[in-house]
Image (tube, rainbow, N blue to C red):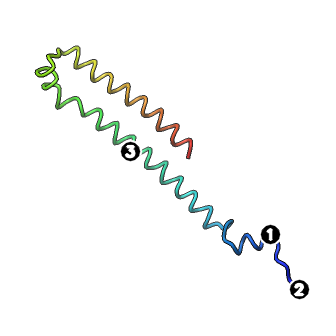
Amino acid sequence: MHTSTTAESAIQSGKNTPRHRSSRLTKTLISATLTACLGAVSFGFVLGYASPIQKDLKEELNWNSEHVTWFNVSLMYICIASVVLACAAVDQC
């Protein structure tokens, strides 16, 4: 009479196979890579956002150069905060 052990039943069910572990690693790797890449893309969009609208900000909102500069600086602070949040998201994976 042959009885299967716990290890044999786990192997037969496929729950503890290298394939199962590698798929979890792949999901983690993909999510971390996307987080890092999308953070860089977001940073680039924010850096380039204020340049084309500076003229409109000055004309429509009656802003002077100092106001536009503060607007650009506030965008940079948002970028810095998003990098910190992205790092926390990657660490969670």
Label pair 3/1, CB-CB below 8 angstroms: no
Q: CA distance from mark 2 to mark 1?
A: 16 Å
Q: Secondary structure at mark 2?
A: loop
Q: Residue at x 50, y 37 (%)?
A: 87
Q: Name the residue carrying label 3.
A: 38
Mark 3–mark 2 Cα distance, whole angstroms, equals 58 Å
3 or 1: tag closer to the N-terminus: 1
Tell me the element at label 1: helix
> In the visual, does 16 lie left or right of 33?
right
3 vs 1, front mark = 1
Disc 3 residue crowd, few under 14, some 14–19, many 20+, Cα 10 Å:
few
Amino acid type of the residue tagged 2 in the rendering? Met
Q: Sequence-wise, which precedes: disc 2 or disc 1?
A: 2
**Tag 3's secondary structure?**
helix
Q: What's the residue at 37%, 41% (across, down)?
A: 40
Disc 2 packing (10 Å; few <14; some 14–19; many ≥20): few
Q: Residue furthest bottom?
A: 1
- Residue beneath label 1, please? 6
Residue type for callout 3:
Leu
Left or right of 59 in this view: 70? right
Front-lying residue, 1 or 91: 1
Viewer-side label of 3, 2: 2
Q: Relative to 26, is 85 above or below?
A: above
Give the quarter of the image for residue 64: top left
Amino acid carrying label 1: it is Thr
Position of residue 56 relative to residue 28, above or below, is: above
Q: Residue 25 sits in which quadrant?
A: bottom right
Please name the residue that numbered disc 2 is placed on: 1
**Is 18 rendered above or below residue 86?**
below
For the residues bearing labels 3 and 2, Cβ distance under 8 angstroms: no
In the displayed orientation, state which residue is furthest to the left. Answer: 59
